[in-house]
């Protein structure tokens, strides 16, 4: 693995290797023993993903090169390629990129000597979010095979839905979607359940926000919670052991009743915490594959045991 662009590139063995590695980092402090630089190039707004990467990088002992589009040469018309090549030229050892284009990485393919991590590509993919979601689910159930997982909300505009649907199906989960009319994505070819049915069959309910910034017309949300969201009444009909996920930011009172964001079955903030360790795992895997070693080279991972 030279870059981390898509969950499609990962074998099942590689997925589980990253899950084990992230869990290892949750329990063990490990830093690189070389002076390394990483550039976080976020061309879209971000709180959780950007800060999660920053904390992950600092925990690994990396020096973070920050970037703000509003004060960069992007404002002068500089291309993504030239921006990334600039950071490569000044000494960045890795770049993390979020961009509004669905396929921004095509512009960079085969043109860099340093690894790239996809921190979000338009409406297409969000592979690191997918991996931290997989970690959260696996911590809870110890398996994916046979789990009923419902992804609910703005499926049409969600890169999270795309990445998760593919990975979870591949790992043996039964994946469903639940969306309001107009927010479906027929290209996924996944059964669409009404929310009233979804809450009763799911082991995992993964809610998504309505992404107003990606809509041509603003979706009507006045009655969304009542008709399509997770109300307290619907939550009360979920299985006792079922859990609730959300990549955030959360539209409280729209896709979910505000009181349920931190209810007993919610793992929303646990997902955020897991994001740090999963991103540590992905960063270290890429750098180690390029010949960079830790003080602890992770040879002891077999002693960690199961989750």
Image (cartoon, rainbow, N blue to C red):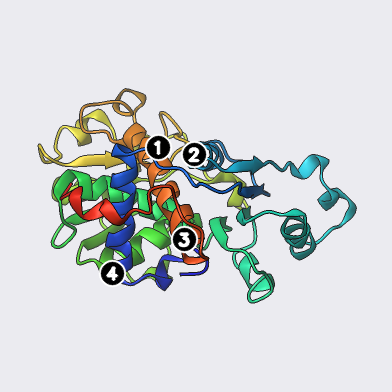
Whole-percent x, y for residue 77 in the image? 87, 57
Query: In front of the other: label 3 or label 1?
Result: 3
* Label 2: how many Cα within 10 Å (few below 14, some 14–19, many 20+): many
Q: Which residue occupies the foreground of this view, 198 or 124?
A: 124
Mark 1, residue position:
272
Mark 4 vs mark 1: which is more N-terminal?
Answer: 4
Number of marks in the image?
A: 4
Please tell me whether mark 3 sits on a helix, a strand or a loop.
helix
Query: In front of the other: label 4 or label 3?
Result: 3
Mark 3 vs mark 1: which is more N-terminal?
Answer: 1
Contact? badges 2 and 1 (CB < 8 Å): yes
* Label 4: how many Cα within 10 Å (few below 14, some 14–19, many 20+): few
Please tell me whether mark 1 sits on a helix, a strand or a loop.
helix
Please tell me whether mark 2 sits on a helix, a strand or a loop.
helix
Mark 4, residue position:
12
Q: State whether residue 134 appears in this view.
A: no
Give me the C-alpha separation between circle 4 and circle 1: 23 Å
Which disc number belongs to residue 65?
A: none
Please give left or right for residue 10 compared with residue 77 in the image.
left
Location of residue 16 by image quarter: bottom left
- As displayed, is residue 41 above or below residue 116? above
Query: In front of the other: label 4 or label 1?
Result: 4
Please give left or right for residue 12 compared with residue 49 in the image.
left
Mark 2 vs mark 4: which is more N-terminal?
Answer: 4
Please tell me whether mark 4 sits on a helix, a strand or a loop.
helix
Give me the C-alpha separation between circle 4 and circle 3: 20 Å
Which disc number belongs to residue 288?
A: 3
Contact? badges 3 and 1 (CB < 8 Å): no
* Label 1: how many Cα within 10 Å (few below 14, some 14–19, many 20+): many
Mark 2, residue position:
52
Q: State whether residue 10 appears in this view.
A: yes
């Amino acid at each position: 693995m030279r870059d981390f662009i898509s969950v499609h590139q990962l074998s099942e063995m590689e997925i589980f290797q990253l899950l084990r590695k992230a869990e290892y980092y949750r329990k063990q402090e490990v830093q690189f023993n070389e002076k390394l630089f990483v550039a976080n190039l976020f061309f879209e707004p971000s709180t959780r993903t950007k800060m999660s990467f920053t904390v992950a990088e600092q925990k690994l002992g990396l020096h973070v090169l920050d970037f703000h589009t509003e004060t960069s040469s992007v404002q002068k018309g500089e291309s993504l390629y030239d921006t990334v090549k600039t950071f490569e030229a000044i000494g960045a050892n890795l770049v993390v990129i979020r961009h509004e284009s669905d396929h921004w990485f095509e512009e960079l393919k085969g043109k860099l000597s340093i690894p790239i991590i996809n921190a979000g590509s338009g409406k297409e993919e969000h592979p690191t979010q997918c991996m931290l979601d997989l970690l959260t689910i696996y911590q809870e159930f110890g398996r994916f095979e046979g789990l009923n997982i419902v992804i609910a909300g703005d499926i049409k505009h969600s890169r999270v839905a795309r990445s998760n649907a593919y990975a979870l199906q591949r790992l043996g989960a039964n994946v469903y979607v639940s969306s309001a009319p107009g927010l479906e994505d027929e290209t996924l070819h996944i059964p669409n359940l009404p929310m009233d049915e979804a809450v009763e069959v799911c082991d995992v309910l993964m809610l998504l926000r309505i992404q107003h910034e990606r809509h041509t017309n603003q979706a009507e949300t006045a009655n969304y919670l009542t008709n399509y969201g997770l109300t307290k009444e619907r939550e009360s009909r979920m299985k006792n052991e079922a859990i609730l996920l959300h990549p955030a930011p959360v539209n409280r009172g729209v896709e979910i009743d505000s009181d349920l964001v931190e209810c007993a079955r919610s793992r929303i903030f646990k997902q955020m915490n897991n994001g740090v360790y999963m991103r540590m795992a992905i960063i270290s895997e890429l750098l180690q594959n390029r010949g960079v070693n830790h003080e602890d080279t992770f040879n002891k991972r077999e002693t960690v045991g199961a989750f």
